[in-house]
Image (tube, rainbow, N blue to C red):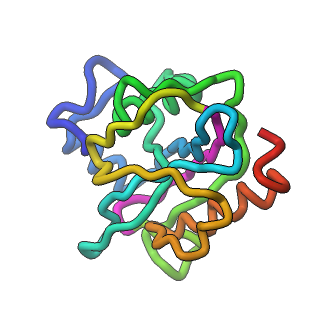
Amino acid sequence: MESDIIGAGNRWLSPDEYSFVRARVPILCVDVLLSPRGRPETIGLIRRPTYGGEKGWCLVGGRVLRNEHLGAAVERHVAATLGDDVRVDLSTLAMRTIAEYFTEPSVGDFFDPRKHAVALTYTASCDGVPHPRGEALGFRWFEIGDLRDVDFGFGQGDVVNRVLAGLGPEGDQR
């Protein structure tokens, strides 16, 4: 969840300013499909509210701030969502696909009524024990073979499938 003042200085916006921008401009975001170090056949997802009172399993991620490096944005969202104990190994961070979320369901493959967002989707290994917080209602490690029955939010099952299809067997290209 966004705080009352979304940051400080020229990198941040008040909630009213962010709402104004979000209603008019696509928002750049990062998402990350995490795996525990040495276990590329396992991925981590958060359970979170989506829209219409629903909940679903999603990638960790969110918007990029002005003058923020993309890797730093990934680290910031992982820490904000899974706690300071989880550390992303930036040497494994790799951009895998781009997902564009539209505010109208008929415009594209992905729908988010809150905003038009362009998400750069990464994979990365991490260390540490996740402690879900913020927007995360829960966190779970999933074996890649067990994803077919997962109730994804925001259509992110298709994003996960795109990423995994590009990785080959058991995520061996990470």
- Which residue is at the front of the view, 125 or 95? 125
Residue 42, given in percent of the width and then of the height, sits at 62, 49
Look at 60% across and 67% down and name the residue there.
146
- Which residue is at the front of the view, 129 or 64? 129
Q: Quadrant of the N terminus?
A: top left
Label tally:
0
Residue 7, given in percent of the width and then of the height, sits at 27, 25
- Specify the quadrant of the image occupied by residue 31: top right
Look at 61% across and 24% down and name the residue there.
89
- Specify the quadrant of the image occupied by residue 15: top left
Residue 26 seen anywhere in this rendered image of the structure: no
Residue 123, given in percent of the width and then of the height, sits at 66, 41
> Does the magenta portion include 34?
no
Look at 25% across and 32% down and name the residue there.
6
Q: Residue lying furthest left in this view?
A: 4
What is the span of residues highlighted in magenta in the rendered image? 113-125
Look at 66% across and 59% down and name the residue there.
144
Q: Main secondary structure of the magenta part?
A: strand
From the viewer's perspective, is residue 158 above or below residue 5?
Answer: below
Residue 83, given in percent of the width and then of the height, sits at 35, 30
From the viewer's perspective, is residue 56 above or below residue 170?
Answer: below
Residue 12 seen anywhere in this rendered image of the structure: yes
Left-right relation of 6 to 48:
left
From the viewer's perspective, is residue 92 above or below residue 169?
Answer: above
Q: Residue lying furthest bottom in this view?
A: 106
From the viewer's perspective, is residue 54 above or below residue 58?
Answer: below
